[in-house]
Structures are given as structure tokens and as C-alpha cells.
Image: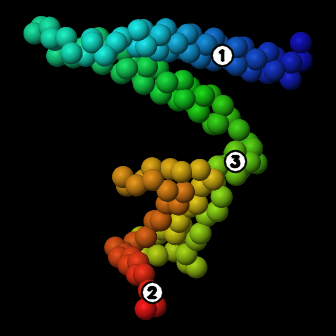
């Protein structure tokens, strides 16, 4: 086997291993979702065991969140970090609408003024499609003008 074939075989082996891990975690998530769906509203009204700090439902939901986070991290670590700069740029363009820059770097070294996304994002407790990265505190006022 030549070198390129060996590299391709190694890459495919890594991809296969990653795929198996993700499928295993997805199966666990599906099982946990099914378990969570079986719980009825009556369960939440039942008295809790004095020996436990949390409930099985709470543990199940936390486990689902942890597994989904692990899957996302695996995908990011294994795939994104191996992308070329051009592929990363294409990937970013799928969800970033625009990036507004300052004319020059400010005192803190910041050059990005705001980022507009193609979908709503949560930032500083608010939902919107734009993240403003301003140095100073701003106050915005909205007025309604009407003729009488």
C-alpha cells in the first residue's frame, strides 16, 4: 500500500470509530427520551424519597443533555478541527449573515462591532439575530410620533 492509501485507511478508521460512538450515544439518548416520555404528570406530584436529592426524571433529563453535548463536542473536535481554512469559511457562511467591523482596532484590541446570524441566537439573556459587541454602555430610546 502506498502512503496515500494508508492515510485514507487511517482517516476512514477514525471516521468509523467516531460514527460508532455517536450512534451509541444517539441510541442512549433515544432510550432516555422514551423513558422520559413514559413519565406522567402524576409522577411529579408523588412525594420524593428523603434519601435522594433529585428525582429519576431529573437524572434522565441531565443525562440526555450531557450525551447531546458530548455528541456535539465529538463532532466539533473530530471534524471541524480537521477542516481546511476554506471549508471552515464555507461552514461559517452557512449561519453568519454579516460581520461589521470597526475602522481600526479599539483600545482593548477589539475589531468586531457586531455579528448578524441567519437565525435567532441567545446572548446576554436576549434573543435576536444580531450580537452587538460594543465597548461602551448604550441606551436606546424608541419614540412614537403621531399627528393629532
Q: Position of residue 121 (x, y in %)?
A: 50, 50
The front one of 93 and 6 is 93
Question: Which circle, 3 or 1, is nearer the viewer?
Answer: 3
- Mark 2–mark 3 Cα distance, whole angstroms, equals 41 Å
Question: Which circle, 2 or 3, is nearer the viewer?
Answer: 2
Q: Earlier in the sequence, mark 3 or mark 1?
A: 1
Asked whether the residues under the numbered discs 2 and 1 touch, taking CB atoms below 8 Å apart as contact, a structural biologist would say: no
What is the total number of numbered labels drawn onto the structure image?
A: 3
Asked whether the residues under the numbered discs 3 and 1 touch, taking CB atoms below 8 Å apart as contact, a structural biologist would say: no
Residue 61 occupies quadrant: top left
Residue at image position (45%, 50%) is 122
The front one of 103 and 141 is 141
Residue at image position (49%, 24%) is 68
- Mark 2–mark 1 Cα distance, whole angstroms, equals 61 Å
Where disc 2 sits, the SS reads: loop
Q: Is residue 32 visible?
A: no
Mark identifier at residue 146: 2
Residue at image position (55%, 10%) is 27
Residue at image position (47%, 69%) is 109
Asked whether the residues under the numbered discs 2 and 3 touch, taking CB atoms below 8 Å apart as contact, a structural biologist would say: no
Q: Position of residue 49 (x, y in %)?
A: 14, 8
Mark identifier at residue 94: 3
Mark identifier at residue 79: none
* Residue 55, above or below 119: above
The residue singled out by tag 1 in the image is: 19
Amino acid at each position: 500500500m502506498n502512503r496515500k492509501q494508508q492515510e485514507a485507511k487511517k482517516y476512514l478508521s477514525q471516521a468509523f470509530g467516531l460514527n460508532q460512538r455517536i450512534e451509541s450515544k444517539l441510541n442512549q439518548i433515544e432510550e432516555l427520551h422514551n423513558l422520559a416520555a413514559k413519565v406522567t404528570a402524576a409522577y411529579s406530584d408523588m412525594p420524593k424519597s428523603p434519601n435522594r436529592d433529585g428525582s429519576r426524571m431529573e437524572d434522565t433529563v441531565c443525562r440526555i443533555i450531557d450525551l447531546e453535548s458530548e455528541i456535539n463536542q465529538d463532532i466539533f473536535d473530530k471534524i471541524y478541527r480537521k477542516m481546511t481554512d476554506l471549508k471552515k469559511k464555507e461552514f461559517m457562511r452557512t449561519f453568519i449573515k454579516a460581520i461589521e467591523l470597526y475602522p481600526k482596532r479599539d483600545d482593548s484590541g477589539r475589531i468586531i462591532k457586531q455579528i448578524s446570524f441567519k437565525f435567532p441566537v441567545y446572548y446576554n439573556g436576549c434573543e435576536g439575530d444580531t450580537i452587538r459587541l460594543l465597548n461602551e454602555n448604550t441606551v436606546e430610546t424608541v419614540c412614537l410620533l403621531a399627528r393629532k
